[in-house]
């Protein structure tokens, strides 16, 4: 069998037996793949019985038949080839610094004096216009970096606050930066005029441009002080600023510096349950009510959207096998996502020729189809507002709250029972994920610490010291009793 088509040419579903059919009859040994072309035609490719080799190639005849160009083909072994070329790349010097300081109260690693001098000099030269193209430091990077510095100064424990080297570097560069930075960044770096010691009045007086930024600035004052927001406050900001609109690669709406500071700041402060609920539910009605599939059960699989770089990602194949037994599954994600930029289900499906541009109503029909029974939905189609953040997320480096909440989505509902299975890696997020599942009102939920925080478990023996927190293969979950959903039992409204 040849693995075949481009995402522009067809959509893929499986029918027949041993791998993906819903017919449990073990006597049938032939598996067929149907490619539904956009023009309504159907091309059937059969796998020969007892054939074990699969050739993942596109020969010249197939390319010519499908009207493809060699230059259009992506290397499936290199996930970075799926990154959209139109996205501007971040400055690597500042990005490395963000990886150290834009994280939690115990994980932050202060910069040395040499590192801090290099980063601040790079930012200064960039805002002065001395750096071009990929060397330029983006507004989102500058906002995230100074948000990290401010939160560390205001609320982090002593061991992860500013180092002596960072303090000396800031004392030298801040008078120069104060004359070069825009007012929104000065606000982020010193919101109350008390950190830098120069009597700065810009931060305390800054209110933003327009009503949208005014709400964002008000929320940021609380975040930069190490505080938290209410459910309505978070949802109000998100709905005000998203989707991001771009012109020539630059945001035409809200300040990217302010928004990146908001997103990374909430993660650094460790989100409360109320804040996570707000992120999780904010855009449920973006495209109207979720379609309801007429199936007896539906399992939603949520894995890290930024993919895998070291271990096999098996959920797509698990969903195909489950469909053989009449169990419906829904997978969701994106083609490429920072910070990891690893292999995703959408990349695998694109390489196989599947249609990854399904609308929610098309996906509902495939779930109800007894010959299919599982479906993949791209965030691009289901939540365009959140999808618009991919470029910004690359420039803030660390994962924002959305990296947690996007795994607990319910793009399609079921008339029967629903379950959610989600992967996690960092200890402390297993209970919030289960809380969000209960808030979704599903009958059962499960969190799994699989390889790379995904759902793929390991069969290899490992010492406890090789994994932070819980060991790989750790699971925790709930199941509601009787006919009531977990949301009603838990009281999480």
Image: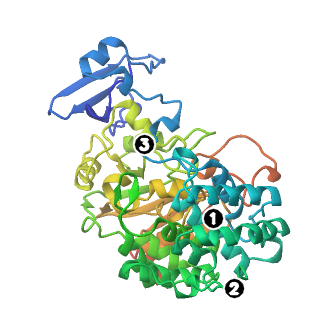
Q: Secondary structure at mark 1?
A: helix
Q: CA distance from mark 1 to mark 3?
A: 24 Å
Q: Residue 377's spot in the image, x, y percent?
A: 35, 50
297 w.r.t. 186: above or below:
above
Q: Residue 446's spot in the image, x, y percent?
A: 54, 61
Residue 145 is marked as 1
- Farthest left residue in view: 40
Q: Residue 171's spot in the image, x, y percent?
A: 76, 72
Left or right side of 300 for 40: left
Q: Choose mark 2 or mark 3, whichever is in front.
A: 2
Q: CA distance from mark 2 to mark 3?
A: 41 Å
- Residue tagged 3: 84
Q: Residues within 10 Å of mark 3 (few under 14, many from 20)?
A: few
Q: Choose mark 1 or mark 3, whichever is in front.
A: 1
Query: Which image quarter is the N terminus in?
Result: top left
- Residue tagged 2: 194
Q: CA distance from mark 2 to mark 1?
A: 18 Å
Q: Choose mark 2 or mark 1, whichever is in front.
A: 2
Q: Residue at x 33, y 36 (%)?
A: 354
Residue 302 is marked as none
In-front residue for pair 351/36: 351
Query: Which image quarter is the C terminus in?
Result: bottom left
Rendered image quadrant of residue 72: top left
In-front residue for pair 230/69: 69
- Mark 3 or mark 2, which is nearer the start of the sequence? 3
């Amino acid at each position: 069998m040849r693995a075949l088509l481009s995402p522009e040419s067809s959509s893929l579903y499986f029918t027949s037996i041993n791998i993906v059919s819903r017919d449990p009859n073990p006597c049938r040994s032939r598996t067929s793949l149907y490619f539904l072309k956009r023009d309504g035609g159907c091309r059937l490719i059969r796998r020969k019985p007892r054939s074990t080799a699969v050739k993942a190639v596109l020969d010249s005849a197939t390319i010519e038949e499908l009207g493809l160009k060699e230059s259009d083909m992506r290397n499936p072994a290199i996930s970075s080839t799926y990154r959209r070329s139109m996205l501007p790349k971040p400055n690597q010097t500042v990005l490395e610094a963000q990886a150290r300081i834009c994280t939690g109260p115990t994980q932050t690693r202060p910069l040395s004096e040499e590192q801090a001098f290099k980063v601040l000099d790079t930012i200064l030269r960039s805002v002065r216009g001395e750096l071009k193209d990929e060397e330029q430091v983006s507004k989102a990077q500058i906002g995230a970096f100074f948000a990290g510095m401010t939160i560390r100064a205001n609320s982090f424990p002593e061991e992860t606050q500013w180092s002596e080297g960072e303090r000396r570097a800031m004392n030298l560069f801040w008078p120069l930066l104060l004359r070069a930075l825009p007012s929104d960044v000065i606000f982020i770096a010193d919101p109350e005029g008390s950190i830098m010691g120069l009597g700065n009045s810009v931060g305390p007086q800054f209110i933003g441009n327009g009503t949208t930024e005014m709400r964002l600035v008000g929320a940021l004052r609380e975040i930069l002080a190490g505080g938290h927001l209410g459910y309505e406050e978070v949802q109000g900001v998100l709905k005000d600023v998203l989707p991001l609109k771009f012109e020539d690669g630059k945001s035409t709406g809200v300040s990217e510096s302010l928004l990146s500071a908001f997103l990374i700041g909430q993660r650094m402060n460790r989100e409360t349950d109320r804040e996570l609920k707000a992120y999780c539910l904010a855009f449920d009605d973006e495209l109207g009510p979720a379609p309801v599939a007429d199936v007896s059960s539906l399992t939603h699989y949520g894995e890290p959207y930024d993919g895998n770089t070291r271990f096999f990602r098996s959920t797509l194949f698990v969903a195909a096998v489950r469909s053989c037994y009449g169990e419906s599954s829904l997978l969701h994600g994106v083609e490429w996502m920072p910070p990891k930029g690893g292999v995703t289900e959408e990349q695998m499906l694109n390489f196989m020729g599947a249609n990854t541009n399904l609308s929610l109503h098309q996906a509902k029909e495939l779930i109800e189809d007894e010959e299919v029974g599982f479906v993949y939905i791209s965030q691009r189609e289901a939540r365009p507002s959140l999808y618009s953040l991919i470029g910004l997320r690359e420039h803030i480096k660390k994962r924002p709250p959305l990296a947690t909440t996007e795994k607990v989505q319910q793009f399609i509902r079921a008339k029967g029972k629903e379950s959610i299975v989600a992967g996690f890696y960092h200890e402390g997020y297993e209970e919030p994920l289960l809380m969000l599942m209960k808030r979704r009102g599903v009958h059962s939920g499960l969190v799994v610490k699989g390889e790379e925080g995904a759902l793929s478990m390991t069969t290899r023996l490992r010492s406890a010291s090789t994994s932070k927190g819980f060991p790989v293969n750790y699971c925790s979950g709930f199941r509601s009793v009787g006919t009531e959903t977990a949301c009603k039992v838990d009281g999480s409204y």
